[in-house]
Structures are given as C-alpha cells and as structure tokens.
Amino acid sequence: MVLLVVVAIVGMLGAWLLPSTGDWHRAAHVHLAFALGVMPLIMGAMTHFIPVLTRTRAAPRSVEGYAGLAWLGGVLIVAFFMFALLDVVRSVAAFLALVAAGGLAVWQLMRAGEALGGAHPGLRWYVAALVCLAASLLAVLAMSVWPQQFLALKRFHLHLNLFGFVGLTAIGTLQVLLPTAVGHPDPQVSNRLRADLHFAFFGSVLIAGGAAWLSLLSWLGLLLWMIPLGRLMRAWFAGYRAEIFRWHGAVPLVAAALAGFFIALVAGGGHALGWLDSTGLAHLFVFSFLFPLVSGAAGQLLPLWLRPGQQTEWHTRARLRLTFASGTRAALFLGAGLLALAGFKWASWLALAALLSFALAVVSLLRLPR
C-alpha cells in the first residue's frame, strides 16, 4: 500500500508536469493520473478495507496482485497515448484492468459470504464501483469493434470512471473515514450507506449514458447523486463542523474532497448546457476532489500501513506530520479547482504547491525509522 500511495502521488505530479515537457496527447496526462496512479491505489485500498468490513483474514498475495495488474494496464495506456501505439495496445491495457476489476469484485463477494452477521454496507459501494470500472473498460474494448460510436464510448468511459468508479469508492470510504479520523462514530453511517447506494450507482450510470448519448439522462443522474451527497453533507455539518474547519488533521481534506466532488457534479451540469469547457471541469475534478481525497486519506491511513497493528504514539506523530496545515491545503485545492474552472491557468500552481507540501511530508515520514 505504501508503494501505491507513492506511485499515485508521482502519477499526479507527473500528470501536472507532462504537458510542459512536450506536445503529448491530452489523454496521456489524464491517464497518467488516473490509470497509473488512482486506479491501482483504489484497488489496493479496497484490498486493505475488505477484511475490515467483513471481519475476515487479510487478503492473500494473489488478491493483492490485482492492483499491480491494473498498474500494468495503466502503464500500457499511458504509453499508447504518448507514443501513438497500435490500437491493440489500448485493448490489452483495458483487458488487464478488466481482469483486475473482475477478480477483485469476485473476491469481495466471496468475503461478503464469509462475514458472520453480514458484511458492512460499505462493501456494496466497492462492488458497485468495480462494476462501473468494468463497464467503462468494456466500452474501451468496444471502441475497436464499434468505431462509429468511438466518441460516445469515450465519453461513457470517462464519466463512468470519474463518477462511478472513483466517486462511489470515495463517497463510500469517506463516510467511514471521517468519523474514524475524528474519533467520534457516526451512528447513522450504515443506514445511509444502505439507503443511498442505488441513488449514487444509477446516478453515475445515467450521467455516463447522458454524456455519451442523451444529455437529459445526465441531469437525471445529477439529481440522483444530490440525494446521498445532500444527506452526507448535512450529517457532517451537524456532527463534525468544528473538526472540518480546523487547521490540522485529515478531516479538513476529507471534507474538502466531498465539497469538491459536489462542485464537480454541479459543474458537470453546466458543461452539459455548454456553459463550461471540459478542460476546466477536468482540472476542477482533479484539483478540488482528487488531490484532497488522496492526501486526506493517505494522511490518515499511511501510518497504519507503515506500521500495522496496535496504534502507538508514533502513529499519532506520523499523522500530525502528514496532516499539518491541512486546512490551508484544503483551501488551496478548492480554490485552485474553482479558479481553473473559471479559466485561470495559473491556478494549477496553487494545487501543485499544496500537493508538493504533502509529498514532502510523505518523504520525510518514509525516511524515519519504523
């Protein structure tokens, strides 16, 4: 997991730097961040969380290998766009990631069957996220046999990945992660996760289908997503308001990620109407959602992955190191995304400054004796 966190940070930094190194295909730096960085990290995180959600043994090495298989697919797809390789490379990359997604989903369902008293409802969000990922990868494979629908399939792939795979995983995880970071449980989290999954899942599918074929569907999907997001924001604001607006700790970043996802959804509606351009929307999603999501979650979980087992004073100090001035980082991430959406290209420097400060904190932590 530690390696996957580092790879994700490097991938996001590389995606920021790549456009300045040459006239690369626009999709190259997008896939560098998502396919090479975020997708394997999410799969690795799922591998870590599923035994917790099902109260079963740790994942075997074979299951941990799915994240590596997805990473290999990410390497291939980045190379495909950077060097204009044959279409078969794109298909192989999608197939590798599809095998990883399918294998991980099957393992999760098997573990759910082993859970005494039933698995935590967060597991269903992970399975639904992997279903979205698999469907988006099937769309990539379909591009070679259905070329007349290439643009529609590309849009379907993009939106189902962003709002389905990443969105479902993130919102399902954050609902448990924030109360854990605060140290104060949310008694309604299980009920919310059970009640809201179908809104979020079908909302994601409708957004992707609308982006590809019928824009009205996107608006229906947006409205469906507003239901779980509205409930979650209301619960957090009522129960954790003081912690959200602190200067340090993982909570401000986790809350910023939720706010960024909400803003990205609303901005997506504006894009569907032609009010906002896709480049600004993509930067908003990355800067205001993805960056605080990864840095906030890693700030809370990386010490545990470095030293599994009983929590000690070392874990507390490590989290303080990783999440120092996180309130400032959260503000920079949100501000950078909104400014990028408004067309200010220099906004990316704000996001880079915040991400680099976290990357340096990770490096300093890794250099400490464990």
Image (spheres, helix red, strand yellow):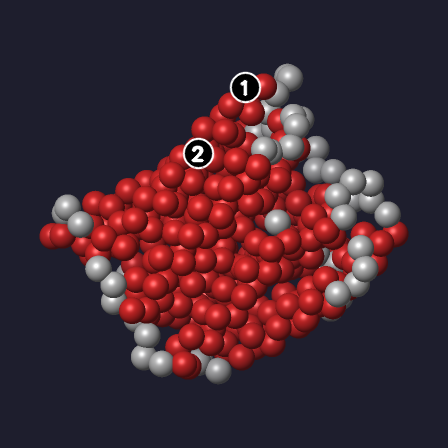
Q: Residue furthest right?
A: 313
Specify whether 92 is left or right of 179.
left
Q: x and y percent of residue 162 in the render?
A: 41, 52
Q: At numbered mark 2, what does the secondary structure look like: helix, strand or loop?
A: helix
Quadrant assignment for the C terminus: bottom right
- Against 129, residue 303 (above or below) is below
Residue depicted at 69% across the width and 67% down the height: 363
Q: Residue furthest top?
A: 117
For residue 248, say whether it is visible.
Answer: no
- Against 143, residue 125 (above or below) is above
Residue depicted at 62% across the width and 40% down the height: 48
Q: Which residue is mark 2?
A: 103
Specify whether 291 is left or right of 161.
right
Looking at this view, is 223 or 156 the one in front? 156
Report the disc number at residue 113: 1
Looking at this view, is 30 or 96 the one in front? 96
- Against 295, residue 223 (above or below) is above
Residue depicted at 48% across the width and 41% down the height: 66
- Against 177, residue 19 (above or below) is below
Q: x and y percent of residue 101 in the render?
A: 42, 39
Kindly identify the amino acid type of the residue bearing the numbered disc 2.
Answer: Gly
Specify whether 250 is left or right of 290.
right
